[in-house]
Image (cartoon, rainbow, N blue to C red):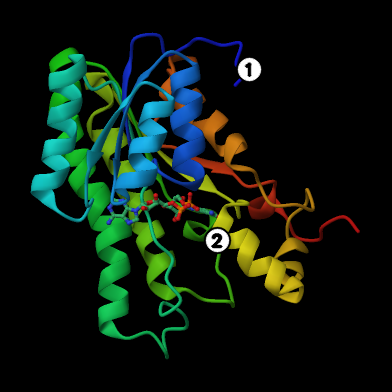
Amino acid sequence: MDVKAHRLEGRVAVVTGGASGIGLATVRRLAAEGAHVVIGDLDPDAGKQAADQVGGLFVSTDVTDAAAVENLFKQAFDTYGSVDIAFNNAGISPPDDASILDTGLEAWRKVQEVNLTSVYLCCKAAIPYMQRQNKGSIINTASFVAVMGAATSQISYSASKGGVLAMSRELGVEFARQGIRVNALCPGPVNTPLLTELFAKDPERAQRRLVHVPMGRFGEPDEIAAAVAFLASDDSSFITANTFLVDGGISGAYVTPI
Ligand SMILES: NC(=O)c1ccc[n+]([C@@H]2O[C@H](COP(=O)([O-])OP(=O)(O)OC[C@H]3O[C@@H](n4cnc5c(N)ncnc54)[C@H](O)[C@@H]3O)[C@@H](O)[C@H]2O)c1
């Protein structure tokens, strides 16, 4: 990757969900800016491959498991000597999470565990390491659906992302004077493999969403990764407790260009 900035030289970054999509693009970007990257993911093959590509570390992790999450951050600290950046990004968006009328309790709980409880566990594990050095940047992946409603509902997903947004804001405020910044990253719809496949099969479904994006396209994982690198770096030193929207203008739009 041709990255001119080297803002993260020697920093240690933990990335959950780093084996695919936004997480994978971010692993590459953070490494290109000089960070040691530690990937926590369920997928051992893709996770290990990604870590190998950037000379980083893969730790097999289910982010819903408290002991596994503690182990992930401990491994990062024991291997590289600090935890400077936590990108808590692993998340799911399963098809059985839809309208509230059709979504069962089990489907609801699964999404809450993976998308919201995991962020609680990761922040709880990361903050004590950051307190030791009075410095750290935590970026939690929420979504634009944390600030907007959709008639194409995924009720537990949206509620979980709203939770991530509120939790990040609160942590950002609580730990601001200890040098720890916490921000919620809110991507708009991004061209990850899942989305591309879904919309290739169903162009009408894609169009129903695209019409709301002022830029007229979905985001690319590299564009989200660039925002994470900014939030991770000292370039964003006065930004905390923030709702950081990277959404092609969706959340600001009423009538979009033809
Ligand atoms: N793609 C989008 O359009 C979009 C938009 C807004 C927000 N987001 C959010 O961005 C994040 C990343 O999304 P993506 O599109 O890159 O997804 P993706 O499916 O490409 O990658 C998610 C990664 O998380 C891992 N993962 C899933 N469950 C896990 C668990 N229990 N423990 C550890 N790892 C687990 C997967 O193995 C995978 O590597 C998610 O939180 C998602 O909700 C995505």
Give the class, few, some or many, for how many residues have Cα within 10 Å of label 2's Cα (few <14, many ≥20). Answer: few
Residue assigned mark 2: 194
Q: 166 above or below 87?
A: below
Q: Residue at x 44, y 41 (%)?
A: 23
Q: Residue furthest left?
A: 67
Residue plotted at (59% across, 61% down): 195
Cβ–Cβ under 8 Å for marks 1 and 2: no
Q: What element carries label 1?
A: loop
In the rendered image, the quadrant that contains the N terminus is: top right
Q: Classify 106 as above or below 21.
A: below
| CA separation in Å, label 1 and label 2 | 26 Å
**Could you say where residue 132 lies in the image, as x and y percent from the top left?**
13, 17
Q: Name the quadrant containing residue 237.
A: top left
Kindly tell me whether residue 107 is visible in this rendering.
yes
- Give the labeled residue for mark 1: 2
Q: Residue at x 21, y 16 (%)?
A: 80
Query: Is label 1 within 8 A of ligand 1 (CB to nearest ligand atom)?
Result: no
Percent x, y of residue 76: 20, 26
Ligand 1 contact, mark 2 (Cβ < 8 Å): yes
First in sequence: mark 1 vs mark 2: 1
Drawn side of residue 113 relative to residue 145, left or right: left
Residue type marked 2 = Leu
| In-front residue for pair 11/241 | 11
Residue 81 as seen in the image, left or right of residue 29: left
What residue is drawn where x is 42% and y is 71%? 94
Q: Quadrant of residue 122?
A: top left
Residue 227 location in percent, x, y? 54, 31
Amino acid type indicated by mark 1: Asp
Can the viewer see residue 88?
A: no
**Above or below 43: residue 23:** above
Residue 108's tag is: none
Q: Is residue 152 left or right of residue 167?
A: right
